[in-house]
Amino acid sequence: MTSGELAQEQRLSNPYDSPPRFQLFIGGSWVDAASGRTFSSIDPTTGHAWAEVAEGGPEDIDRAVRAARTAFEGGWGQATAADRAVALRRLGDTLARPDVIERLAVHEVLDTGKVVREAMGLARAFSSWCYYFAGAAQALQGDTIPVPMKDTFTYTVRRPVGVVGAITPWNSPILLTLWKLCPALAAGNTVVIKPSEVAPVSTIELAKVIDESGMPPGVVNVVSGQREAGAALASHPGVDKIAFTGSTATGRSVMRAAADNLTRVSLELGGKSPNIIFADADLGLAVNGIVSGAFAATGQMCTAGSRVLVQDDVYDEVLEALMERTRSIVMGDPFDWATDVGALTWGTQYHKVLDDITKAQAQGARLMIGGARPGNAPTADGYHLAPTIFADVGQEMDIARQEVFGPVAGLLRFRTEQEAVALANDTEYGLAAAVWTRDLARTHRMVNAIDAGTVWVNCYRRVTASVPFGGVKASGLGRENGLDALRDYTETKSVWIDTNEEARDAFRLA
Ligand code: NAD
């Protein structure tokens, strides 16, 4: 980064003099909710409302699904893969504009409490999802299949499923929306997005960018609203697939609601990912991995590596180094480029994390650092919590079993590789895991033995458009990113052609 770019980023701040209002985006138009209702979005750094947002309900969801259906059956449905690739590339080009990157980053800072460094890093990457899936759109192809019958030609084609409902959480709203939107559009579907009521604004700002990019009306629709709006989308008979990211409990409700219409679902749910450090690892690297795995995004990551399993011989050394590194973490103004960790995104989550900390202490975990609002919190009412480390965590404790979704790491001990595997897999979740070791043979054994959708080795938190991401067990169903995601947004149609015209009058029963 040049010093000019750095100086420019340091100038980023709330651009509004008074709380802005945000509407629904349906059928290419900006509209109020049918009920006329609005709700406030809270800036987590101050704890006060900063924007007013249209509160869409079932009627608005229905309007949006109809608009998406019309677009699917109209121009977008007739578009070739090359046309769709052009639309996605145009969206990528719009997302790559420096002014758009800054605009989206600023709205995420204000709405989610992300620090500007992280928000800008994410915003710079958004276009890469569009470009990857623009290419993938044209690589979507069927097969010609040999069959044991004479004079028969058989092939498959991939068809879009139709209207996709995308329901997203509050922790990384734009990124998690693009994970659904890009493969859905590449495959030829239209989309209705229901962002989280906790942080809806950046997704609405994304809709403005989509509009600016020239996307045809109705192809992408955004309906902000409460949980009822999500439920209305999940149970809408006009929706052909629900792509959901959120908690495991809500994922179960979504799947139940979708069952009545036999709507397909993909679910990206919670996690309790093990971060496993062997004595032979590069411990400096591993400690950095624990810090970024547990405290980046204020710990509000589905993949948080908050269950830190450390081999006995190096447990004390790792704990000491981790505490030292954690003491250097800067909390403060999220618009300050030097700030490492911002506020939690909303009050309910903040108090839940504080309760989890109290419970962990009551259950016998040893609080080593953090555990409360930092003395130098930048505002009195913001949801700030100092990065927190527990030692002597037992596998039976809630802190080792349940998702905290805050900046809290708990250290457990293991002696042998077998014990590490047993601890790692003793969880209802299976989203991600990391293994820190220099032993190649052990790497392969661990990768094979761990039940998780992603295993990182000597790294953490790497994701990109081309690599499938998703969970096993209670962490979800299906995959986002990569060609797996693209296929999840299609149906296979099988085609049989009898090529023997001579035999057309013959009646075949078998
Ligand atoms: P949540 O489940 O409370 O809400 C997610 C979305 O679902 C919101 O838009 C909400 O309005 C909607 N919703 C709520 N009830 C609904 C219902 N009955 N039917 C349909 N929609 C409904 O989750 P959250 O608190 O916003 O997000 C945090 C959770 O998301 C954590 O558990 C985290 O692990 C998970 N998450 C998973 C991933 C992943 O990729 N696996 C990524 C980020 C977050």
Image (cartoon, rainbow, N blue to C red):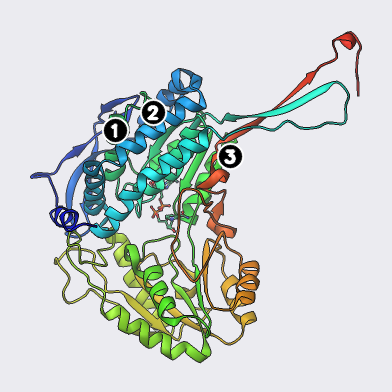
Tell me: residue 315, above or below residue 111: below
Q: Which residue is mark 1?
A: 24
Which of the two discs, 3 and 1, sits closer to the camera? 3
The residue lying at 54 percent from left, 78 percent from top is: 438
Residue 309 position (above or below residue 477): below
Q: Secondary structure at mark 1?
A: strand
Residue 10 at what x, y percent from top left?
Answer: 15, 57
CB atoms at circles 1 and 2 under 8 Å apart? yes
Position of 133 with respect to 349 (left or right) is right
The CA distance from mark 1 to mark 2 is 9 Å
Looking at the picture, how far across and down is residue 349, in whole percent? 32, 62
Write down the residue under mark 2: 64
* Residue named by callout 3: 487
> Ligand 1: does it lie within 8 Å of the C-beta at label 1?
no
Tell me which label, 1 or 2, sits earlier in the chain.
1
Residue 146 occupies quadrant: top right
Residue at the front extreme, as displayed:
2
Residue in view at x 18 percent, y 38 percent: 21
- Quadrant where the image shows the C terminus: top right
Image quadrant for the N terminus?
A: bottom left
